[in-house]
Image (spheres, rainbow, N blue to C red):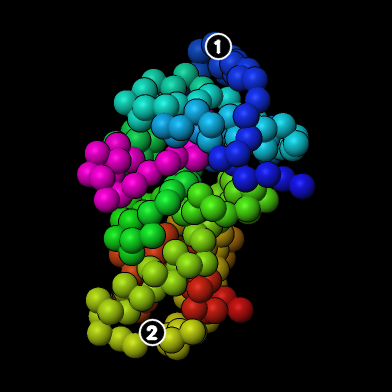
Amino acid sequence: MLRPLSCVIFVLVLPLPKSTAKKKVFQGMDDRNASSPIRLLVVNKEPIVVLGFQQLLSSVSDIIQVANCYDHKDLPRLQERYEPDVIVWDLDFCNENDESAAIKILEVNPNQKIIMFTQCLESLCVVKAAEIGLQGYVYRDTSPQDVLSSIRAVIEGKIHFDPSATTRLMQHMHQAHDNPVAPSLDIPLTHRELEVLTLLSDGLSNRDISKGLSIQERTVKFHVSAILQKLHARNRTEAAVLARQGHLLD
């Protein structure tokens, strides 16, 4: 049985950096070899949590912890050195420093996958995570298996927000637009918009969506704009979360 991450201690093994061969600083999703293990960087102030992740990942073969970071000020250096596919980060957006740090990381590498691993129950934290464009939002008391699932989901381009976090996001968005909260959304999307939304929710770029649907990229942009407007979503992350929680893609 997998034990809670905060309760596991074992000997720290220092990870090795990626090859020092000259190459571009950051990898995009398209550059990653699908057969290679997912490279994980854990950012957390508590050593026991970091060690708990190492213990958890010792039981799987498709995810490796390449680096640990105890202070987000060190993260840009470690991100450049180890090129993680996913960062699991103990963020709290009630703290402005955490918010600005996450924004800076995504400004440098917009393709970086970040999962917010948090205790924050405030709707503000969920809303900011979606607005900034984080791919995952996981509470610290979630099961180890769900943590692994979230890592695998975001590397596939999916948005993985804890169900209760998604509910908070939907409540905020409905209240912001003076709409009642409902278990499902009744949005008049066209058939083509639903096709675009499905691929968007799977993490595809506009270019990939245009190839998949055999339409022009500018047409995809038009549909994405219409989808965001109809869903009252500020960005693709919010649209994907609303689509899944509102059962638009069922």
Front residue of 39/4: it is 4
The reply, left or right, for residue 205 in relation to residue 171 is: right
Between discs 1 and 2, the one toward the N terminus: 1
Measure the alpha-carbon separation of dots 1 and 2: 53 Å
Task: Report helix, strand or loop for mark 1.
Answer: loop
Q: Position of residue 237 (x, y in %)?
A: 42, 60
Location of mark 1 (residue): 21
- The number of numbered discs placed on residues in the rendered structure image is 2
Task: Report helix, strand or loop for mark 2.
Answer: loop
What is the quadrant of residue 239 in the picture?
bottom left
Q: Residue at x 35, y 35 (%)?
A: 105
| In this view, 119 is above or below 35 | below
Location of mark 2 (residue): 181
Let me know if residue 85 is in the magenta part: yes
Q: Position of residue 220 (x, y in %)?
A: 43, 64
Q: Residue at x 36, y 76 (%)?
A: 171
Q: Residue at x 43, y 49 (%)?
A: 118
Front residue of 148/56: it is 56
Let me know if residue 30 is in the magenta part: no
Q: Which residues lie in the magenta part? A: 84-102
Amino acid at dot 2? Val
| In this view, 224 is above or below 246 | above
